[in-house]
Amino acid sequence: MANIARSLLATTAKCSHCGGQATLDYVGDGSVGVHVCPDRYVSRIIAYGSRLDPEGVRKFVEGAAKGMQEVEGSDIRVARRYSWDLGFESENDDLVLTEAYWTQNYRRTKSEDPDRPALFLCANRDSFFVQPLRAKETLCERCRS
């Protein structure tokens, strides 16, 4: 699944934090993608697989986003990608990939406070950290020490 995601879904997007270009980085074994801008702000976390447990994805995001508000089940969206959707020729229009994703700007609180806690991905490793939205640090605490 990770190879399919890397080859077919590796797109860029506009960052909701800075308006710049967000790229899709992969963490862990490559089954989780993270849209990040050059400032390392996390716009979206996406899990890929043939079958995904939204509750497991919720727990992953909640663990990554410690220090922010609680992640609820309704914060996780699920999308299914079929062969026709990905440009594959298939007689059955088979399900190829399932994505479960969390988007940081779907905040339940619409606070525009520039000091609100926000999720970032360390520039040196697969670790997430929380800092104020307007902060400019790109390294997690462990990498800063």
Image (spheres, helix red, strand yellow):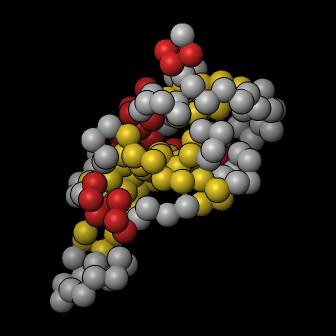
In the rendered view, does 4 fall on the left or right side of 119? Answer: left
User: Residue at point 80% right, 38% down?
Assistant: 112
In the rendered view, does 103 fall on the left or right side of 79? Answer: right
Q: Is residue 94 above or below residue 112?
A: below
Q: Residue furthest top?
A: 145
Image quadrant containing the N terminus: bottom left
In this orientation, which residue lies closer to the viewer: 11 or 81? 11
Give residue 104's quadrant in the image: top right
In this orientation, which residue lies closer to the viewer: 110 or 39? 39
Q: Residue furthest right?
A: 113
Q: Is residue 116 visible to the viewer in this orientation of the structure?
A: no
User: Residue at point 58% right, 33% down?
Assistant: 120
Q: Is residue 115 above or below residue 7?
A: above
In this orientation, which residue lies closer to the viewer: 97 or 126? 126
Give residue 27's quadrant in the image: top left
Image quadrant containing the C terminus: top right
Q: Residue furthest left?
A: 91
Residue 91 position within the rendered picture, expressed as x and y whole percent measured from the top left? 18, 89
Give residue 117's quadrant in the image: top right
Q: Is residue 4 above or below residue 19?
A: below
Residue 108 position within the rendered picture, expressed as x and y whole percent measured from the top left? 65, 40
User: Residue at point 25% right, 71% down?
Assistant: 95
Label total for image: 0
Residue 137 position within the rendered picture, expressed as x and y whole percent measured from the top left? 66, 26
Q: Is residue 40 visible to the viewer in this orientation of the structure?
A: yes
In the rendered view, does 5 fall on the left or right side of 19? Answer: left
Residue 11 position within the rendered picture, expressed as x and y whole percent measured from the top left? 49, 63
Q: Is residue 144 above or below residue 78?
A: above
